[in-house]
Amino acid sequence: MSFTQRLSDLAYATGWGAVRGLPEPAARGLFRAAADLAARRGGPGTRQMRRNYARVVPQAGPAELDVLVRDGLRSYARYWMETFRLPGMNHKEIYRRVDDVFVGKSLIDAALDKGKGLVLALPHTGNFDVSGIWLVGHSGPFTTVNEKLKPESLYERFVDYRQSLGFEILPSEGGAYRLLMERLRANKIVCLVADRDLSKRGIPVTFFGEETRMPAGPARLAAATGAQLLVVDNTFTDDGWGVRVHTPIPVHGREDVVPATQRMADAFAADIAANPVDWHMMQKLWLADLDDDRRQALKTPQESRE
């Protein structure tokens, strides 16, 4: 384990320990101050967030982008504050508060009534762990996938954290796809964060007018099992959370995977455009932001010949 990995692991361990014990006003103030400091410093992640927001709000001038980035960092900081505090919060109370504002419960119930499972696809917006707490309370445990982080101890911390909320966690490597299909065939729910996949496995889509790639998993799983595919919109409110399940996407077979993924991207774009500051994308997403070698490496043999 490298020094950087040890430091990262220690930072998260401290978060789940110390932040959890802070009074909420103190925690909010601390994370808000950290977000504002990050906005002033303008590090690589902050600069990339600015470039991403410039696509989402193309009419924004420099001053408006400054505000968007500051508010986006505050939203992202709130997500982490809540992440560190959720294990010690009252999950029944969270369920009740989310249930009061949840939009689209009938779509979830109707999908499960068909008996073929449900795939929920969502971007990196709001606090999807809070939505997961609601989903566990409404429909029982669901299955999701965690990226294999380094060091292993950090990955295990995230697995333990999300399992404590009632989620079933599968590693992104080692047969996750087969297990996800099994869950769907048992009429269970699978939740997948699906707004970024800059690999050869990603499906080319147009997103805010430019090319990027998004995971094939949601549409492929729906095609293979007959499960319903729905999009989820997670947002923050001043004193809580907003969750909306919408846009049933038909996927009748393998030939529908590509157009279904584009429809998913379009639904993500509409939700993000309506509330850009709750989209926590600080990584390169569009192919135009990658260097030439990385873009070339992403091309399929057919694309390269063209």
Image: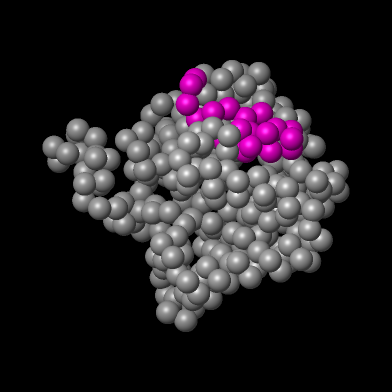
Position of 238 relative to 91 (above/below): below
Residue nearest the viewer, comparing 270 with 193: 193
Residue 245 visible in image = no
> Residue 304 at x, y = what percent?
17, 39
In percent of the image, x 47 and y 32: which residue is there? 217
Magenta span has 173?
A: yes
Magenta span has 87?
A: no
In percent of the image, x 50 and y 74: which residue is there? 40
**Residue lying furthest front in this view?**
3
**Residue lying furthest bottom in this view?**
63
In percent of the image, x 61 and y 33: which residue is there? 156
Left or right: where 32 falls relative to 205: right
> Residue 187 at x, y = what percent?
66, 22
> Residue 193 at x, y = what percent?
54, 42
Q: Look at the image and give the residue range highlighted in magenta.
A: 155-175
Position of 275 relative to 63 (above/below): above
The colour scheme used here is one colour
